Image: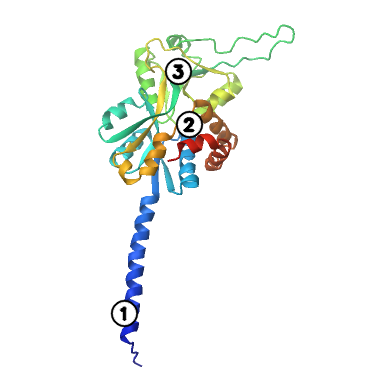
Amino acid sequence: MSTKFSVPLIVFFLLVGMSALFTGTTHGQDEGRQVVRLAYVEWSSEIASTNLVRAVLQEEMGYQCEIIPMAADEMWEAVATGEVDAMVAAWLPGTHGHFYEEYKDQIEDLGPNLEGTRTGLVIPQVTPGRQTGRTGLQNVPYMNISSITELPEHADRVRGRIIGIDPEAGIMRQTREAIEVYGLDGFELISGSEISMAAELANAIRRLEWIVVTGWIPHWKFARWNLKFLEDPEGVFGGREEIHTITRQGLRDDMPEVYEFLNNFYWTAADMEQLMLWIEEQQGVYPADQARRWIRHHRDKVEAWLP
């Protein structure tokens, strides 16, 4: 059976097909432009900040946002090569300083989004008993040392171990340097994750065992336990640091609203610790829900970030 179409009908079908073609192409380009890709390291601080930034981009600005966990070295390389658009997880000038020196000509530094951070070696300051009823005095903390220089005297008590995190993290590089500078030749730096480090710390505190871990603030563990940084007289871990926002080159031209928001994004350690605690209370499940909760409680601050 043969089918015949009139010329006007053929023209109609051609126009519909061309319209669908161009509409589909434009829609695809818009979708590609709208997806913002953020890299982060799986530290509780960066889980909090990156999920918050994603929530603002999606809930307040209408962008799609993909967040990608990486090791610290991979994160810096991903921003430098344009594999991702940005990160809000650069600890400078010390912890990630060597990454900055390597990639500084390939990225754009928007400056600090949080100030007053610190890294170093941390020990419990937990006491073995409760306050005495009559005097109100507390027992002496079961780990009664103050400086990294004292660790060689107590190597057996800490089993010659320093409990660390991701082997490529800046704080691990600093700790390896501290082992050399302070003559901790018999010590082993244990690589792992933030989760495994916190679990080791919790177990040691519960058993009143000696332990040394890599630590940084802001971090929820300082709110949960009484901890302290060991003195670092040689300055291996540096002083106070900042967390910076780093973007790929060209983001300002490609996504000016996203760039402006990231440039405006700034909060305090207390802000971050509140979100970190909310996430930790939920065992780290669905941090995006807690980020949206934080937004609801801090409308004025969020409004100030928006373009």
Is residue 195 visible from the viewing direction of this image? Answer: yes
Residue 165 is left or right of residue 228, and the answer is left
Q: Residue at x 54, y 23 (%)?
A: 222
* Element at label 1: helix
Residue extending farthest to the right is 134
Instruction: State the residue at coordinates (58%, 22%).
Output: 225
Q: Is residue 168 among the parts visible in the rendering?
A: no
Of all residues shown, which one is farthest toward the bottom?
1
Q: Position of residue 270 (x, y in %)?
A: 53, 26
Q: Mark 3 or 2 closer to N-term?
A: 2
Q: Which of the marked residues, 1 or 2, is nearer the chain's N terminus?
A: 1
Q: Disc 3 versus disc 1: distance between alpha carbons? A: 82 Å
Few, some or many residues within 10 Å of mark 2 (<14, 14–19, 20+) = many
Estimate how packed mark 3 is, as few (under 14), some (14 to 19) or many (20 or more) residues with alpha carbons within 10 Å.
some
Q: Which residue is mark 1?
A: 11
Dot 2 corresponds to which residue? 45
Q: What percent of the width, then of the height, locates residue 111? A: 37, 29
Quadrant of res 124: top right
Q: Which residue is mark 3?
A: 160
Q: Please identify the quadrant where the C terminus is shown.
A: top left
